[in-house]
Image (cartoon, rainbow, N blue to C red):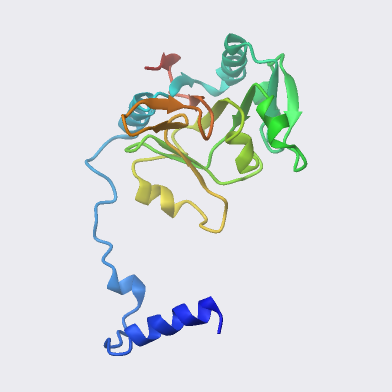
Amino acid sequence: MSSRERILGRVRRALADVPRDDMPYEQAVPRDYLREHGERSVADTVDLLAENLADYRAIVHRCTPADLAATIAGMLAARGAKTVLVPPGLDAGWLAEVDAERIADRAESTPHELDRVDSVVTACAVAAAETGTIVLDGSPDQGRRRITLVPDHHICVVRVPEQVVSSVPQALERLDPARPLTWITGPSATSDIELDRVEGVHGPRTLEVVLVGEDQASADVSV
């Protein structure tokens, strides 16, 4: 008998005298929690996203679609990035004014090769304002999960307002659970038992988010 069979056997014996419940799981677990907290306009929701992103030590930029290429180029130049990793489906116009060498997202790239890349630019699937969370789902404009976990600098573009929702429950409704989802709330950070914060341990040390939309005034927010 395998370990698996022994464990399952113990579970069956433990449940032998438990009354059978024919109620489906979807009905057994109540879904009456709040889908969002408070009532906000679209502009207020975007402002809350920017506020919470900055609170988690992300750097937030706002621009119009016409200014996006210049905004990204300025961010990379300010960091001194000589190489930028580009997902295969990223809009080429976003990097039209970038001087840095473009590195393709290749399956055969090693962690050491990715670690030598200065920056990575991606889109996103959705952003939740109440938690300041951005979700990537591995779509062509976001690339493989590892390209946003190894390089030290991640620039993520969020289209406003269509990719911004108030809450995590609303974000979940837009996501495919079968896809490789990466949930990002600020730059990579961890704390030891003495609460000393260390950034960049298991992901980018610097996260810059660009909120791009027709109503976005040019502004940078950071902490």
Question: At 43% from the left edge and 17% from the top edge, which residue is drawn?
Answer: 217
Above or below 173: residue 108: above
Residue with the most extreme left position: 38
Residue 71: name its quadrant.
top right
Task: Indicate the quadrant containing the C terminus: top left, top right, bottom left or bottom right.
Answer: top left
Q: Is residue 162 above or below residue 55?
A: below
Which residue is more in the foreground, 62 or 54? 54
Which of 109/211 is in front? 109
State the image coordinates of residue 91 (x, y, percent, origin top left). Answer: 67, 31
**What's the residue at 44%, 84% (across, down)?**
9
Residue 194, image x and y in percent? 31, 29
In the figure, is residue 15 to the left or right of 104? left
Q: Quadrant of residue 90?
A: top right
Locate the N terminus by quadrant: bottom right
The front one of 3 and 183 is 3
Q: Position of residue 5 (x, y in %)?
A: 51, 82
The answer to whether 139 appears left or right of 3 in the picture is right
**Going by the picture, which residue comes out furthest to the right?**
108
Q: Which residue does the image show at 24% across and 60% down from the upper left? A: 32
Residue 160 position in % (x across, y down): 46, 32
Q: Is residue 151 left or right of residue 113?
A: left
Q: How many marks?
A: 0
